[in-house]
Amino acid sequence: MKQKQTSRWTPFLPYIKNKYTLTLLGFLVWLAFFDRNDFITTWSYHRQLNKLEQEKAFYDSEIAKNRMYLNELRTNNENLEKYGREKYFMKRDNEDVFVIVDNRDSDKTEN
């Protein structure tokens, strides 16, 4: 005689056929994949939020550095003169300014 082979799902069959279990399972599938706030979208929003928070921290630190630098320029005339000379090639009346251009970088790109 052949014996009836039982599946490993047999003990769970009454629970799977239950209408409340099917409703709960359908609801979870709907929330996981089809809802506007599904898991994948929520995860991508979380990644984007972390990225934006890192950018905010970076820009906050840059703003703090620039405020200190600006305060130093406003209070110290020597630093203001140095900044004008370096950035805008300003000079005094009795001085000459020589600008040296490094062409080594442009030679590499031409070859």
Image: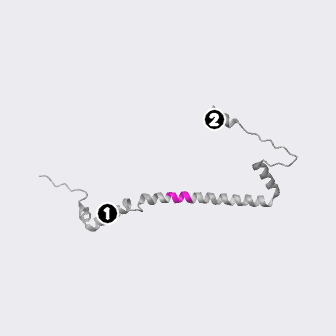
Residue farthest top in this picture: 111
In this figure, which residue is indicated by the disc labeled 2? 109
Range shown magenta: 47-52
Q: Where is 74 relative to 93, above or below?
A: below
Q: Quadrant of residue 66?
A: bottom right
- Looking at the picture, tell me which residue is in the foreground, 98 or 36: 98
Horizontal placement of 34 versus 111: left or right?
left
Looking at the rendered image, the quarter that the C terminus falls into is top right
Residue at x-position 61% and y-position 59%? 57
- The residues tagged by marks 1 and 2 sit, at their Cα atoms, a distance apart of 61 Å
Residue 56 percent location from the top left of the image: 59, 60
Is residue 50 magenta-colored?
yes
Helix, strand or loop for the magenta stretch, by majority: helix
Instruction: Please tell me which residue is depicted at 55% across the width and 58% down the height of the picture.
Output: 52
103 lies above or below 55: above
* Residue type at the position of mark 1: Gly
Sooner in the amino-acid sequence: mark 1 or mark 2: 1
Across and down, in percent, residue 61 comes to 65, 59
Task: Residue under label 1, please give it.
Answer: 26
